[in-house]
Amino acid sequence: MPKKSSDAAGHGSWFGRLDRAFHLSVAGRGWRHAGELELMQRSMGFAALGFLTLVPLLIVVAAADPANGRGFAQWLGDGLGVSATAQQEIQQLFAKPRQALESTTAFGLAALAVFGLTFGSAVQVGYEKVWELPPARWHTMWRHLVWVAMLIGYLFLSAHFTLEPDRSEPVAETFWRFLVGVLSAVLFFWWSQRLLLGGRVGWVALLPGAVGTVIGLLGLRVFSRLVFSPLIATNAVTYGPIGTVLVVQSWLVGVGVVVFGGALVGRLLHEEGHRMAHMVRRRR
């Protein structure tokens, strides 16, 4: 009997040491911070406000670009990285962009601007929670409007870099187009954190978060190709157009997880780099 008790105590202490090691590790700190950040709930809010704000604005912007002939449905399909079948379902969902442009009123654009401010505020609060900063003052709301305007412009320009490559296109041209798209995304998310945080966090500290966000978006694109693409086709048959909307909304939730999660990973990497540098200096 004493031997069993001793074995149980040793077994328990082994699990205890493992649990403490996890909590002290980067992964453990990230898990705790994600819980404090309420990552999933915040991402669902991001998806709801993003769908309410970005979809109407991007439909209008895409319809105002007749030279390229690319509607919002094509943009969205390229962003998700879906197959041709799923692209057709999205195309049916947003079939009349020109009508949306003609029926847009000044009041409607003003309402979208208000929702855009709310969307920018939600992203800013998420970044502040990541870095554990106090809320910014009310007179910094202009940053939200600037950020939404730049986001629309960035999505408009990046749409030309996310097209599926033509088989006849040279490999070098495809590579450079991909590289420009990745670098522009890193710059945008790097600048976004700096702007929305009001310069309270340094550029160097924010760079890992921007890189992590872009890597996460590339992974989400692969995930979309494998999961969301067949879901759009099956949900369209089962539920009709609302099934496609549900998949798009789920994809936006994933984007929210990547945006806030990437910033959180960047903070953890920055802090871990500082800790390791401090340990090296102490050993010297």
Image (cartoon, rainbow, N blue to C red):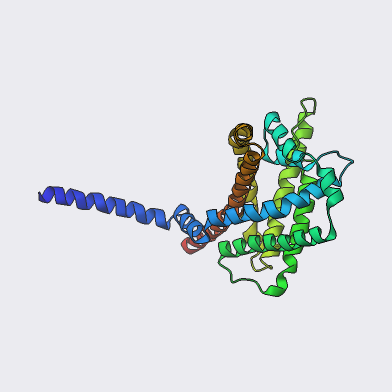
Residue 92 on image: x %, y %:
74, 36
Say if 182 sits above or below 117 in the image. Answer: above
Residue positioned 61% across, 52% down in the render: 256
Residue positioned 88% across, 42% down in the render: 66
Q: Is residue 6 left or right of residue 53?
A: left
How many labels were placed on the picture?
0
Residue 104 in sight here: yes
- Along the viewing direction, whichever of 90 and 243 lies nearer the viewer: 243
- Along the viewing direction, whichever of 232 and 137 lies nearer the viewer: 232
Say if 189 sits above or below 78 in the image. Answer: below
Residue lying at the far top in this picture: please name it: 168
Q: Is residue 182 left or right of residue 160?
A: left
Residue 22 on image: x %, y %:
40, 53
- Along the viewing direction, whichever of 277 and 15 lies nearer the viewer: 15
Residue 212 in sight here: no
Q: Is residue 102 left or right of residue 242?
A: right
Q: Is residue 11 left or right of residue 37?
A: left
Q: Quadrant of residue 176?
A: top right
Residue 31 on image: x %, y %:
47, 55
Residue 222 on image: x %, y %:
62, 37
Residue positioned 46% across, 61% down in the render: 283
Say if 136 sits above or below 52 in the image. Answer: below
Residue lying at the far right in this picture: please name it: 67
